[in-house]
Image: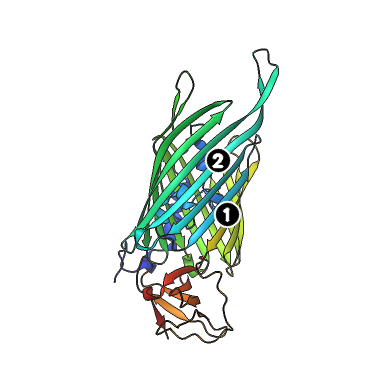
């Protein structure tokens, strides 16, 4: 089946054109963003995005998509867990947690929790005497859903319950995020999101103060393997916050031998850097970005665990793999040969027509775990056997 593209041949989309688009993103919009209610939600991009100038709308292919762009929840095929931790200026701390569970044709479901807080703030009375310490905690509890529509388009939605506590008082509220992702050929991904839709909190004080979160409208683009350099990626985001303020970020990433990752980027506040290491089902990312409200910088660390359904099964001694014809009576796992790579062609789903390298096959669960040839640095994915065709 021929895919819908901007041109007949995806390779006609030149890297130079993508670079030009990223430069345009970096030179557009100069208004300062910050200080609005709900600003802490903008910290949920993950360490990978912070190493790329904050650009994450088109590249977030893990559970943290629930915070960044729910439209990218639909493409994911494995159970994943993400956790991010950051230490900020002025004794602020930040963390988030996200979990995604694909549920076949019903779509993908995700949950998340993010918090920014400050503890041990000294309280003072009207005479400036210290009374007692207090905390300032901002929380968002998130439920997300995403699903592929056709072979190339993914749509997602998240609902957020907001809770802010400060010196014995509390504010609660809710909000929505909408997102989409469009996959054009093997190289180009476009992502977009509308965040903080109708989002606000109301305090339980006598004034019943209501704070409204500014809506963010953003779009991003990612181009993989430009100039035929395997493992290289270029990306950029542009967002409009509250209808008037803008923000942007561009970055590049290089994955070396499916093990080490280097990143660099640029945002309004200056240069950003990052890196990561992958080992099996685990990945650890680090992102360095300038602090918005003071001198210095902040570090974000994100841990990702790709939970595979065949992860706990023991594999026998390796041998040359042959496609299974019928399920055996007892559980058996075939593993690829160490001397010959077994290949499959994906026949169904959003990755239709992609070729992939077999990592392992589980006849008991009728699944196959593969890594895409077109994205050598991508995480392994698990598919049903009836979704693939084994190649000679």
Callout 1 crowding tier (Cα within 10 Å): few <14, some 14–19, many ≥20? many
Residue 356 or residue 204, whichever sits in front: 204
List the residue tagged with mark 1: 264
Name the residue at the front extreme. Answer: 329
Q: Nearer the viewer, mark 1 or mark 2?
A: 2
Residue beneath the point at 35% across and 62% down = 105
Task: List x then y, in percent, for residue 29.
Answer: 44, 40
Judging depth in this view, the residue of 165 and 262 nearest the camera is: 165
Up/down of 204 relative to 325, above or below = above
SS label for mark 2:
strand
Q: Quadrant of the N terminus?
A: bottom left
Q: Give the residue at x 56% y 60%.
A: 305
The residue at the point 48 percent across, 73 percent down is 370
- Location of residue 131 with respect to 117 vertically, above or below: above
Q: Which residue is mark 2?
A: 115
Q: Position of residue 9 (x, y in %)?
A: 34, 69
Is residue 48 left or right of 385 when viewed as pictured? Answer: right
Q: Quadrant of the C terminus?
A: bottom left
Q: Which mark is residue 52?
A: none
The CA span between labels 1 and 2 is 26 Å
Number of numbered discs on residues: 2
State the SS at label 1.
Answer: strand
- Answer whether labels 1 and 2 touch (C-beta < 8 Å): no
**In percent of the image, x 48 and y 77: which residue is there?**
361
Up/down of 340 relative to 105, above or below: below
């Amino acid at each position: 089946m021929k895919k819908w593209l901007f041109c007949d041949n995806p390779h006609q989309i030149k890297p130079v054109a993508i670079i030009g688009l990223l430069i345009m993103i970096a030179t557009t919009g100069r208004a300062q963003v910050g200080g609005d209610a709900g600003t802490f939600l903008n910290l949920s991009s993950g360490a990978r995005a912070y190493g790329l100038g904050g650009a994450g709308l088109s590249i977030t292919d893990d559970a943290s998509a629930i915070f960044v762009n729910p439209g990218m929840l639909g493409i994911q095929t494995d159970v994943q867990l993400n956790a991010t931790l950051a230490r900020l200026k002025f004794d602020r701390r930040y963390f988030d947690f996200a979990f995604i569970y694909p549920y076949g044709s019903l779509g993908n479901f995700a949950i998340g929790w993010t918090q920014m807080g400050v503890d041990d703030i000294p309280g003072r009375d009207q005479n400036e005497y210290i009374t007692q310490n207090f905390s300032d905690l901002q929380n968002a509890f998130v439920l997300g859903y995403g699903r592929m529509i056709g072979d190339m388009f993914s749509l997602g939605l998240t609902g957020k319950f907001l809770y802010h506590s400060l010196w014995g008082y509390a504010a609660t509220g809710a909000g929505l995020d909408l997102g989409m992702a469009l996959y054009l050929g093997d190289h180009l991904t476009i992502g977009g999101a509308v965040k903080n839709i109708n989002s606000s909190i109301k305090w339980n004080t006598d004034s019943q103060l209501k704070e409204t979160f500014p809506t963010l409208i953003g779009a991003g683009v990612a181009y993989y393997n430009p100039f035929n350099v395997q493992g290289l990626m270029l990306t950029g985001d542009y967002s409009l916050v509250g209808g008037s303020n803008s923000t942007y970020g561009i970055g590049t990433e290089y994955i070396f031998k499916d093990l080490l990752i280097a990143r660099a980027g640029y945002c309004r506040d200056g240069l950003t850097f990052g890196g990561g290491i992958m080992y099996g089902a685990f990945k650890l990312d680090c992102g360095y970005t300038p602090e918005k409200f003071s001198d210095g910088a902040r570090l974000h660390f994100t841990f990702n665990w790709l939970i595979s359904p065949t992860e706990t099964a023991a594999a026998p001694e390796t041998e040359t793999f042959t496609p299974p014809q019928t399920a055996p009576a007892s559980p058996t796992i075939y593993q690829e040969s160490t001397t010959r790579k077994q290949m499959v062609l994906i026949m169904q789903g959003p990755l239709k027509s992609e070729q992939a390298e077999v990592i392992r096959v589980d006849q008991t669960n009728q699944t196959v775990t593969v890594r895409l040839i077109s994205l050598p640095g991508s995480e392994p994915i698990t598919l049903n056997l009836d979704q693939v065709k084994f190649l000679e």
